[in-house]
Image (spheres, rainbow, N blue to C red):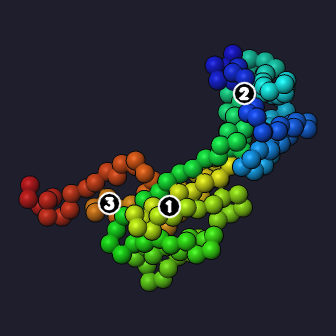
Amino acid sequence: MSRIGKKPISIPAGTECKLDGMTLKVKGPRGQLQGDFHPNMQIAIDNDLITVKRPSDDRIDRSLHGLTRTLISNMVIGVSQGFSKTLNIVGVGYKVDLKGKALNLSLGYSHAVDYAPPEGIEFEVDSKKNVIVVRGASKQAVGQVSAEIRKLRPPEPYKGKGVMYVNEKIRRKAGKAAASKG
């Protein structure tokens, strides 16, 4: 048995799960998520627990077992607590503002970059510290939006300026002057 796959998922109070064939709909205080899962997996909802079982010990079934359980767990956590990622903007003249629901980023280009959030994602901005917090119910969507914002101006290795995740370590390089000395 998969160590992760065999753990049951507890459904918190205020969260509602409905299974229709291989489609699971999860509804909670932070929104609603829906996921389609592989037909080999057996998903069961009993009282306040969701369990995932696999039909055989084939290699594919073993790998799908843990994956399915983790995806369902992320859906339940997302609609009850939500997920967030924090990004820092480092650099002279780089700044971020919230214009309505969209981000207005000044990242050293000749124009400001506007980034509108997809459905289910919201932004929180601290303009003084140049910090963006991306929040949402879907872990995948929060990560995707954070990666797209980071991609607008990825951190560069010489001065370390750009858009980066909090706690991200930038591998710094020595400049030309340090390289020619020795």
Mark 1 Cα-neighbour bin, 10 Å: few <14, some 14–19, many ≥20: many
How many discs mark residues in the rendered view? 3
Q: Disc 3 vs disc 1: which is toward the camera?
A: 1
Give the Cα separation between the discs numbered 3 and 1.
18 Å
Q: Earlier in the sequence, mark 3 or mark 2?
A: 2
Q: Earlier in the sequence, mark 3 or mark 1?
A: 1
Residue 53 in view, yes or no:
yes
- Viewed as shown, does residue 24 lie left or right of 87? right
Give the Cα separation between the discs numbered 2 and 1.
31 Å
Type of the residue with mark 1: Ile
Q: Disc 3 vs disc 2: which is toward the camera?
A: 2
Type of the residue with mark 2: Ile
Q: What element carries label 3?
A: loop
At a point 36% along the width and 64% down the height, the residue shown is 90
Mark 3 Cα-neighbour bin, 10 Å: few <14, some 14–19, many ≥20: some
- Per the image, the residue denoted by label 1 is 132
Q: In which quarter of the image is the N terminus?
A: top right
At a point 78% along the width and 39% down the height, the residue shown is 15
Q: Earlier in the sequence, mark 2 or mark 1?
A: 2
| Residue 94, x across and y down, in percent | 39, 72
Q: Which of 126 and 76 is in front in this view?
A: 126
- Per the image, the residue denoted by label 2 is 9
| Residue 168, x across and y down, in percent | 40, 49
- Per the image, the residue denoted by label 3 is 160
Q: Which residue lies furthest to the left in this view?
A: 181
